[in-house]
Structure formats: structure tokens, C-alpha cells
């Protein structure tokens, strides 16, 4: 049976490449992203792939996904020094509350 990975921040730079790699390695990927700094163009090629699903959601809020989850990869966070300065509260929240909610998916 295929393993399932949840990638938070999956529409971002690192998360989207990780999604590609895991799908190539025969995993199912659930991408959770609120698109605050990410872009659907990063994952556009994965829509329609039966092993990929996308949920637009802020991971600092509770979320439940159906079925067993084998891996949780928490890459959601504004990334660059510029983003940190423009989004300081969101950066702190996703690193603290977001980590807590992401771990709750396991
Ligand atoms: N890019 C690098 O070279 C690099 C190097 C070291 C560490 N990192 C770290 O890796 C992580 C990802 O970096 P990246 O370059 O992919 O950044 P990115 O901005 O491209 O991707 C981050 C993604 O997280 C999403 N996101 C942010 N807050 C969210 C929230 N509350 N709920 C759901 N989604 C949310 C954004 O919309 C975006 O798609 C960051 O923590 C960054 O600091 C990145």
C-alpha cells in the first residue's frame, strides 16, 4: 500500500519539489497551503494526478485529513528575510501553532 505524506507549504519552493520527488517515489501527497507566499503554478502540473491532492488552508488552524498519514513534512512558513519582515506574526504563528496543528495530523 502506498505511503501518504502531508506536506504543509506544498505550493512553495521547497514543498513543491518535495511533492514531485515523493510522487515519483510512489507516495500519495496531500499538500496543504494557504498560498500566502506560495503559488499554484508550482504544483499546477500535479493537478489531475491521482496521488496528489491540494487543500487550501492555513495550517495554524485545525485540520483533519481522511485516512492514515505516514509522513508529515512541515514546510509552511514565509521563507525569505523580506517575507519575515513583512509577515512577522504569520511567521511566528506558523512556526509554533502551525507545527502543533501539523503534528496533530499524525
Ligand atoms: N528556500 C530555501 O533556500 C530555504 C533554506 C533553508 C530553510 N528554508 C525554510 O524552508 C521553509 C520553506 O521555504 P520555501 O523556500 O519553500 O518558502 P516558500 O515561501 O516558497 O514556501 C512556503 C510555503 O508555505 C506556505 N505557507 C506559509 N504560511 C502558511 C500557513 N500558515 N498555512 C499554510 N501554508 C502556509 C506559503 O504559502 C508557501 O507556499 C521555510 O521555513 C524556510 O525558512 C528554506
Image (cartoon, helix red, strand yellow):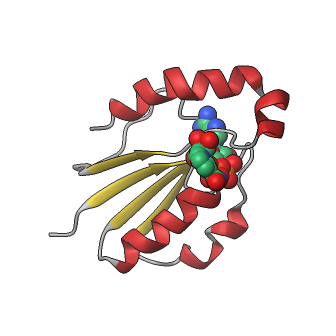
Residue 62 horizontal side relative to residue 2, left or right: right
The reply, left or right, for residue 88 in relation to residue 14 is: right
In the picture shown, does residue 2 fall above or below 68? below
Q: Relative to residue 36, is residue 52 depicted above or below?
A: below
**Of residues 85 and 26, which is closer to you in this image?**
85
Tell which of 1 and 10 is nearer to you.
10
Q: Residue at x 29, y 50 (%)?
A: 71
Please determine whether, in this image, residue 4 is positioned above or below residue 50.
Answer: above
Q: Position of residue 89 (x, y in %)?
A: 72, 20
Determine if residue 56 is in view: no
Q: Position of residue 99 (x, y in %)?
A: 45, 29
Assign the C terminus to one quadrant of the image: top left
- Residue 24 lies, in percent from the top left, at 38, 79
Left or right, 100 with respect to 17, comes to left
Q: Is residue 36 visible?
A: yes
Query: Which residue is situated farthest in the front direction here?
Result: 81
Residue at 75%, 23% in the rendered image = 88
For the point 55% across and 55% down, which residue is it?
10
Q: Nearer the viewer, residue 44 or 65?
A: 44
Residue under the point 72% across and 59% down: 39
State the residue in front, 81 or 66: 81
Tell how many labels.
0
Tell me the quarter of the picture where residue 17 sits. Answer: bottom right
Q: Position of residue 58 (x, y in %)?
A: 60, 35
For residue 45, which quarter of the picture? bottom right
Vertical relation: 82 (above or below) 29: above
Quadrant in the picture for the N terminus = bottom left
Amino acid at each position: 500500500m502506498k505511503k501518504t505524506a502531508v506536506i504543509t507549504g506544498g505550493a512553495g519552493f521547497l514543498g513543491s519539489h518535495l511533492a514531485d520527488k515523493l510522487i515519483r517515489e510512489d507516495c500519495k501527497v496531500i499538500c496543504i497551503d494557504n498560498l500566502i507566499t506560495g503559488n499554484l503554478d508550482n504544483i499546477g502540473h500535479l493537478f489531475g494526478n491521482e496521488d496528489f491532492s491540494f487543500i487550501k488552508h492555513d495550517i495554524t488552524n485545525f485540520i483533519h485529513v481522511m485516512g492514515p498519514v505516514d509522513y508529515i513534512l512541515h514546510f509552511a512558513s514565509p521563507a525569505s528575510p523580506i517575507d519575515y519582515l513583512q509577515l512577522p506574526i504569520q511567521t511566528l504563528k506558523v512556526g509554533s501553532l502551525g507545527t502543533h496543528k501539523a503534528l496533530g495530523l499524525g
